[in-house]
Amino acid sequence: MQITRLFAFLLMVLEWTRPGLSSPLRPICDLRVVDHFIKEAWDAEAALRACKDACSIATNFTVPLTRVDFDVWAAMNIEEQAQEVQSGIHVLNDAISSLQASNQTDVLQSHIDASINNIASIRQVLRSLSIPEYVPPTNVGEDKEMQKVSSISELFQVHINFLRGKVRLLVASAPVCHQGVS
Amino acid sequence: MTKMRSNRLKIVFMLCLGFVTIGGQHFESKVAQLLQDETEHIKCFVEGKDLTCFWEEEEERNHLHNQYTFTYSYENKNKMACAVSSLSLLASNKTIFFCKLAKTPFFATLHLQVLRDGQMLYTRSLNAENILFLDPPRNLTVMSSGKEGQLNVSWLPPQLKYMDDSMIYEVRYAAEGSDLGKVEVIKVSTMLVLFGLESDTRYKVWVRVKPDGVAYKGYWSAWTEPVFGVTPPSDVDPLIVLLVLSIGLILCLLSLTVILSHQKFLLKKLWPDIPTPEHKFPGLFTVYKGDFKEWMSHNNGSMWGRSVHVYTEELPSPLEVLSEVSLTSHGTSQREEMKPAEEDESERSDSGLTDRWRDPPHAHWLMDQLRALQENPESHSQSSLLQSHDTYVTLNQGDIEQQADDVFEETLPLQTLFSSAGTPSLSTSHSDLGSLQQSSGSGRLSSQSSLEYPNHTWPPKGPGYSYMAVADSGVSMDYSPMSSSRIAELGRHRIYTNDYKNEIFPHKWPLSGQYIKSG
């Protein structure tokens, strides 16, 4: 009886600590990996550029801001940059995932699925670079770094711009990739 | 102190002026290029981190720059204005109005508007990261790699942060003086090795750059100023050349030596002499000047002796002549009479003898003797060997013992046959084959195949004649004596040699020159 309790306690402790996740991933510093996802995002954006009226939906999408000022970006530290990127990815993922529920054409559906897979892969890349995970904001109020779009084509434009801009800049300037380089 | 300050200020001013000039040159060239290539009214490009948008002055209108207003907005923000400036292009004699944004937002859609006197003139929406117009690469260098037909080309990318790994380059090269050039495209890397070039040739090289189109897009930059490079000369190792030459020389010398040492042999093989029979006829052409008859008359004996030597396979054997006792009764008178008859007999029995005879005076007597011998069967046994041969020369009759002394006498008819006209001459036996000299009254002789014994009227055995086998090979004749005892016996007797003279050809008769008289 006591052995059983002890055994249950040990399992809880191990589940909590999750020692299996302690092994670090190999950092993916090669920008060609991110470029691969960007190229696929370009294909999706090009396919949906013409789909303005047919692809319009009633509800708006909340999407991250994609604008990058190089001077401002250079002045930010890695944590701020990471927070901006991670939150943006999170929001973008939610917006694109919401399209899966609605009935779309096969071509559009394939692009939606590819984009969701790419976002998941980018998350793995950021994890390999030891980029801090996304922490949802404590205040529920509207995020300043977000915007609204009303069409699927605009959604995918935001998608490609976000990947080319903030995500790529973050991966390029990851401290793990510049260790040992003066 | 003040002097130093002023000097420093001057230096800084000059540097700034230089940079502005260079930038201005780049700016003007970019503007000129976009004026040609860009179809939009508002032509924009990003140089570094600054966005520049310009538009062309309408023809035959002189507007001032303050008449124009340029606004831009992005991400649903309020419109912002940008100061408008004017520029006169000397090359194309055109005037443009332009606006330059210092802090350009990237990765966001910009909405641009041009207003003139408050009226909307042009609009355009674009992303700044898609209209990058880079400066040409810097520090282009072309160097020889040391290998044949190769040149090393290297350069530095334009100074831009965040974009070093997103550039694509184009290298153009051509031989000096040639209009045809080749282009190589290379990504990210800032050096290239050119292959397949001509040796010892001067080449011109240009380079230009453009964003690769994944993260950033834009226009091709202007070409750099050409840089020259010379390819190394063809790689010929002097040692190899020397070795090849020396080996060639050695081979030539060897071949010359071989040719000279075997000159005669080679000449014979390549240019053989026409064979002449001069060596067979010594003195025919030198002494007698081709007169064969004259030569023959002077060179009979030696010629025959020499010619006979040729047929070494046919060894001469002594011709044994045995006479029959029964012939002694005729005496010397018969001897003389028998001479031509026996001559005929020997002549007829020789190989190649024709049947053309001039009947000798004592032919009938001889015929009778032969018939008598034929009737005597005892003598046949001695000539059993003879019967097997095709040709027989019957010279003497059968019984040897009785005719031991008479043989010598009986050889006299043969002697008459074989001796020359006149006295029978004694001569030592010749090892070589003798020749039969035609005696007076004898028949003509010609070369012919073997004489058939059965067809001959002269039987092999006649009274008073021993037998002698004659083997006819067709060309030569081989006389083999009946027994060795006779040879020894005959050795005591005189030996006759007779020359044989043929009208047609001095045939080389393998005749024995020994004519032995046996008693």
Image (cartoon, rainbow, N blue to C red):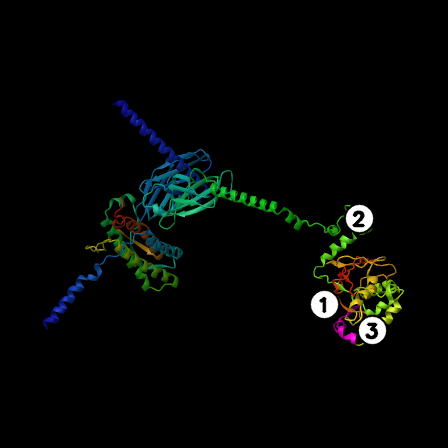
Q: CA distance from mark 3 to mark 1?
A: 23 Å
The span picked out in magenta is B378-395
Q: Nearer the viewer, residue B111 or A48?
A: A48
Please give the residue where the numbered disc 3 appears in the rendered image: B373
* Relative height, residue B411 to residue B304 (above, below): below
Q: Amino acid at mark 1?
A: Ser
Nearest to the eye among marks 3 and 1: give it: 1
Residue B309 in sight here: yes
Chain letter, disc 3 residue: B
Residue B237 in sight here: no
Please give the residue where the numbered disc 1 appears in the rendered image: B485
From the viewer's perspective, is B230 left or right of B335? left
Label 2 Cα crowd, 10 Å radius (few <14 / some 14-19 / many 20+): few
Residue A70 horizontal/vertical position (percent): 29, 44
SS of the residue under disc 3: helix
* Image quarter of the N terminus of chain B: top left
SS of the residue under disc 2: loop
* Relative height, residue B359 to residue B210 (above, below): below
Q: Quarter-wise, where is residue B311 in the image?
A: bottom right
Q: CA distance from mark 3 to mark 2?
A: 52 Å
